[in-house]
Every structure is written in structure tokens, then in C-alpha cells.
Amino acid sequence: MPAGLAYSTGRFAELSYGIRKSRKRQREAFGSSLCLM
């Protein structure tokens, strides 16, 4: 299993696990990153 695939899988699992707990925080971070672009 390639390291990149393992990393992306770990990130996806982490996000899907904490998405309900920190959905508002993620949305605010996403909005601020869009503003920076």
C-alpha cells in the first residue's frame, strides 16, 4: 500500500470521524481559506 494512499485514507477517516463534532469549525476554516485565495 503506497504511503500517499495510506495518508489520504487516514485523512479521510479522520475527517469522516470528526465531521459531526467539528462541522462548524471545518466550515469556518474552509470559508477563511476561500477568502485567502
Image (cartoon, rainbow, N blue to C red):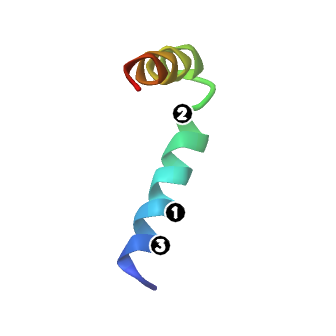
Give above or below for 2 relative to 13.
below
Q: Earlier in the sequence, mark 3 or mark 2?
A: 3
The image quarter containing residue 4 is: bottom left
Q: Report if the CB atoms under discs 3 and 1 are less than 8 Å apart.
A: yes
Residue 7: x and y, percent? 40, 64
Are there few (<14), some (14-19), or many (20+) residues within 10 Å of tag 1?
Answer: few
Residue 24 location, x and y as percent? 56, 14
> Quick check: 37 left or right of 28?
left
Which residue lies at the image location 63% right of the left edge and 25% below the top edge?
A: 20
Which amino acid, by three-letter code, is at mark 1?
A: Thr
Find numbered disc 1 in the image and state the secondary structure of the residue it sits on.
Answer: helix
Image mark for residue 20: none
Mark 2: amino acid: Gly
Please identify the residue farthest to the front as the structure is shown.
37
Task: Look at 46% across and 52% down and name the residue there.
Answer: 11
From the image, state whether disc 3 or disc 2 is nearer to you: 3
Q: Which residue is mark 2?
A: 18
CA distance for labels 2 and 1: 14 Å
| Residue 5: numbered disc | 3
Say what amino acid the circle numbered 3 marks: Leu
Q: CA distance from mark 3 to mark 2?
A: 20 Å
Is 22 in front, or is 5?
Answer: 5
Q: For the residue carrying disc 3, how many other residues have a C-alpha within 10 Å: few (<14), some (14-19), or many (20+)? A: few
Question: Which image quadrant is residue 18 in?
Answer: top right
Residue named by callout 1: 9
Q: Position of residue 5 (x, y in %)?
A: 47, 73
Residue 8: % across, % down: 47, 61
Query: What element does badge 2 sit on?
Result: helix
Element at badge 3? helix
Q: Is residue 9 above or below residue 25?
A: below
Tell me the quadrant of the picture where the C terminus can be found: top left
